[in-house]
Image (cartoon, rainbow, N blue to C red):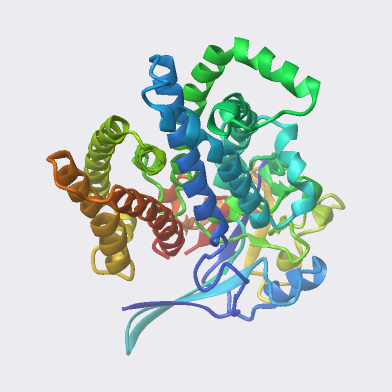
Amino acid sequence: MRYAMAVDTKKCVGCSDCVVACQTENNVPIGFCRDWVVEVTDGTYPILELELRSERCNHCDNSPCVRCCPTGASHYEKGGVVIVTHNKCIGCGACIASCPYDARYAHPDGYVDKCTFCLHRLEKGLLPACVATCPTKCMYFGDLDDPKSPVSVVLKNRKHKTLIPEAGTKPQLYFLI
Amino acid sequence: MREEIIVSGRMNPNIDPFLHIWHWQIPLYLFLGGLAAGILFFAALFYLRGKENEYRASVKIAPMIVPILLVIGLFALFLDLKHKAYFWQLYTVIRLQSPMGWGAWTLMIITPLAFIWAALHIKEVFPKWDWKYQWLKDMEVFFQKYKKVIAWLLAIYSVILGVYTGILFSAFNARPLWNTSILGPLFLVSGLSTGAATAILFSKNHEERKTFARIDLLLIAIELFLIVHMFMGFLASTQVQIDAANLFLGGPYTAPFWMLVVAMGLILPAVLEALELIKFKIPVYIPAILVLFGGIMLRFIIAYAGQLSRWLY
């Protein structure tokens, strides 16, 4: 099993509902966020191109954060989801410095926190909060090993990219372009 | 033209607008760790070569401060932790792929060794010292028998500690400035250089000071070579590393780095030490203090500038 997410940059309108859904679902402290929306504008007026990306932890296959964690608090859960065990984390900040996507932050309670792909919801057979909430249905989630899962189907049929693949992290958050 | 903005307004503390998760604690610790490694390395080296009486300051006096340096350094590391009550989790696993993990274990080994080494020489440095309790005296006799083993362990672990202070940074490919394997040797040589400078500060023996001035001169030359090499590597690399180099070549860290580290911390003390070796009278503590100053500045500047450097997006 290999969980992955695909975000359709052509469908996303940048409403940031995913951000609010995540903050509500995961009780993210005020002033922090586990996901965010990036707006990229290319070109000069009147020839402009817009790309909207809902970004979060990439749950990389080759995660620098898991590699550099001195206690093993950052680890892979089933499906390749990168998770931080709170009471193993010492808050040294190594994983935060090691993430090229800056997807992690130190929770005010001390431990390091980030997107979990809503693992607690996946275990109940639900979709991650951001995917479930998205009003444009621009996010696809599922198991890459299952050829019938929404994410497998959409990745097979659409041109896509990942962020900073040259960092060698093998990210599992795909953007349809 | 390309413009990228986070429209959902991400402003995570210590992450945005640029990473600043590590503050003064980490570079201070890296400096103290490197300095401790340098002092212990020369202490072990000259002891193993049977020169403990000629090089008294290096083998016996300077190591007295090492336990203090390490304790302050470890305390700084502890202050840096944000989940402090769980620090012991470091010692529940051995994770070789995590530099911080094996660094913590290295410290676990070298700190007691540094205490033992200081304890074995404390009577010679402070003649009035009295252990008071019989069991402490027994322990001193016990460790005295294994002094050579301890010296070998110190020689090996001090090099590991010195390299580790640099590897800690270079393991992060997310920060292109740190992501160079030169940082390991650079911090090791800088640590050895500050160790030699400390030996000069403590020494009253002209011959010993001269030897360490020569050693320091060589180490400074190696450091300059490594720094030039580091920039050559960056400039011949990818855009992210070119940008990292540009932090020092016209960017915000140009003046601090070239003035405080290279000019004041390396070239000036090297010139003063060279002048002294060719019989000019220069107070020895001036180049030694400059070397220590350069060492601490190098760590601070690399730590802070590294957090500014990032991937293209």
**B85 above or below B158?**
below
- In percent of the image, x 26 and y 63: which residue is there? B259
> Which residue is the extreme one toward the top?
B145
Could you tell me if residue B163 is visible in this image? Answer: no
Image location of residue B217, percent across then percent down: 23, 39
Name the image quarter holding the N terminus of chain B: bottom left
| Residue at the far left in the pictured view | B278
Residue B260 x/y as whole percent? 31, 62
Which of the 4 image quadrants contains residue B312? bottom left
B86 left or right of B221 in image:
right
Instruction: Give residue A50's quadrant in the image.
Output: bottom left
Q: Which residue shows up at 43% across the image and 44% down it?
A: B170
- x and y percentages locating residue A142 in the rendered image: 69, 51
Point out the residue furthest to the front here: B128
Q: Taking the image as drawn, is residue A104 in sight?
A: yes
- In the image, residue A175 lies at what x, y percent? 52, 61
Above or below, comparing residue B160 to residue A139 in the picture: above
